[in-house]
């Protein structure tokens, strides 16, 4: 029962971090969008796909731990990117 609660909390927190940041980056970020498309860099939407595959795998008992690790990769990528930029300053 505790693992189910942890799994839901984990997926909610990582989803709240992953989805808005990925949509922000894919839409071009702060820079101006000179194209008429919504997503200037649609290849960044693969990050949401990685999180979604991890979320789906976390509900299968044989792959639950792998799914949780896979769904944690996008937020760790964003946190690592921000810390990398801060270290360079």
Image (cartoon, grey):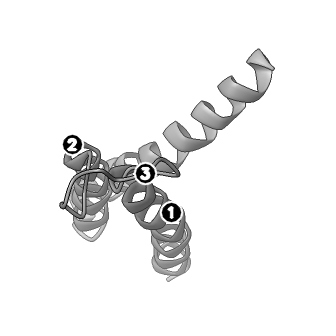
The dot on residue 43 is 2
The dot on residue 80 is none
| SS under mark 2 | helix
Judging by the rendered image, the residue that carries numbered circle 3 is: 32
Seen in the image, is 37 located left or right of residue 32? Answer: left
| Residue 52 x/y as whole percent | 26, 62
Q: In this picture, is 15 found above or below 80?
A: below
- Determine the CA span between mark 2 and mark 1: 20 Å
- Determine the CA span between mark 3 and mark 1: 28 Å
> Residue at the location (54% across, 42% down)?
78
- Foreground: disc 3 or disc 1: 3
| SS under mark 3 | loop
> Residue at the location (50% across, 75% down)?
12
Instruction: Please report whichever mark, 3 or 1, sits nearer to the chain's N-terminal start.
Output: 1
- Determine the CA span between mark 3 and mark 2: 18 Å
Judging by the rendered image, the residue that carries numbered circle 1 is: 14
């Amino acid at each position: 029962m505790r693992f189910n609660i942890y799994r839901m909390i984990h997926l909610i927190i990582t989803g709240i971090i992953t989805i808005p940041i990925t949509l922000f980056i894919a839409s071009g970020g702060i820079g101006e969008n000179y194209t008429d498309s919504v997503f200037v860099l649609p290849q960044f939407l693969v990050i949401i796909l990685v999180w979604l595959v991890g979320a789906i795998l976390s509900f299968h008992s044989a792959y639950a731990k792998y799914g949780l690790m896979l769904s944690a990769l996008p937020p760790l990528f964003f946190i690592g990117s921000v810390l990398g930029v801060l270290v360079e300053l």
